[in-house]
Image (tube, grey):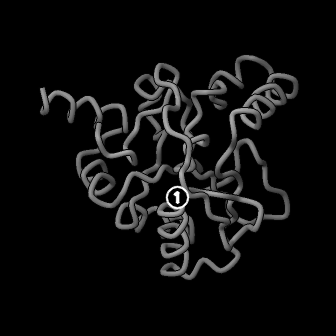
Amino acid sequence: MKDWRVTLVNSSNRVVREPKSLMRLQVEDHELMEREAAEALMALLKEIEAGDGIVAVSGYRSEEEQKEVYAQSLRENGAEFTKKYVALPGHSEHQTGLAIDLGERREYVDYIAPEFPYTGLCGRFRENAARYGFIERYPKGKEDITGIAHEPWHFRYVGREHAEAMQREGLTLEEYCERISANNA
């Protein structure tokens, strides 16, 4: 795939491109994303008037940070949980700067599996996400395709054209990339 925004990163595909231009998110000063993705996220949150109702839990991570997250999850949650929810270092979308984990603001936010329901403010985010280039990366019922358990909090920036096509056709990034490859063969 020639469009860097649609680079497939999963257990079979390593990160091949480090972010070129990281930007701090205005919603959480400590989180970073690739500039184009960050600007789209900020515009989406502004449109839905999210205020402080949605928290950016985890954006860009270096490979070293991903190693730490993976090791911590193994210690605290065990191998079975970690295999389902935490990507191996070098195989995490967070390393691209195009992925963001979001949570509904609550008194306690779980930083591995934050609450991000399909109703209310989070529901409005989902309804508008594709118009801003975001997809829910690990949808329910597609675990056998993505290799990751359902993560309603994990969103991936792929650009508006791709996100709208994926949403319209109900495709995961794996399925979309496969279809594009088949069409270009």
Q: Which class describes the residues within 10 Å of circle 1: few (<14), some (14-19), or many (20+)?
A: some
Tell me if residue 15 comes above or below residue 164 in the rendering. Answer: above
User: Residue 106 lies in what quarter of the image?
Assistant: bottom right
Horizontal and vertical percent for residue 171?
Answer: 31, 40
Q: Nearer the viewer, residue 114 or 118?
A: 114
Tell me if residue 28 comes above or below residue 173 in the rendering. Answer: below
In this rendering, does residue 117 appear at all?
no
Horizontal and vertical percent for residue 71?
Answer: 81, 25
Q: Is residue 178 left or right of residue 17?
A: left
Q: How many marks?
A: 1
Horizontal and vertical percent for residue 18?
Answer: 55, 41
Q: Which residue is mark 1?
A: 118
In this rendering, does residue 163 appear at all?
yes
Looking at the image, which residue is at 59% across and 52% down? 100
Looking at the image, which residue is at 45% across and 53% down? 157
Q: Quadrant of the N terminus?
A: top left
Horizontal and vertical percent for residue 46?
Answer: 54, 80
Amino acid under label 1? Tyr
Tell me if residue 74 comes above or below residue 53 in the rendering. Answer: above
Looking at the image, which residue is at 48% across and 81% down? 47
Looking at the image, which residue is at 41% across and 68% down? 128
Tell me if residue 67 comes above or below residue 59 in the rendering. Answer: above
Q: Is residue 8 left or right of residue 148?
A: left
Q: Nearer the viewer, residue 83 or 123?
A: 83
Q: Is residue 14 left or right of residue 168?
A: right
Q: Quadrant of the C terminus?
A: top left
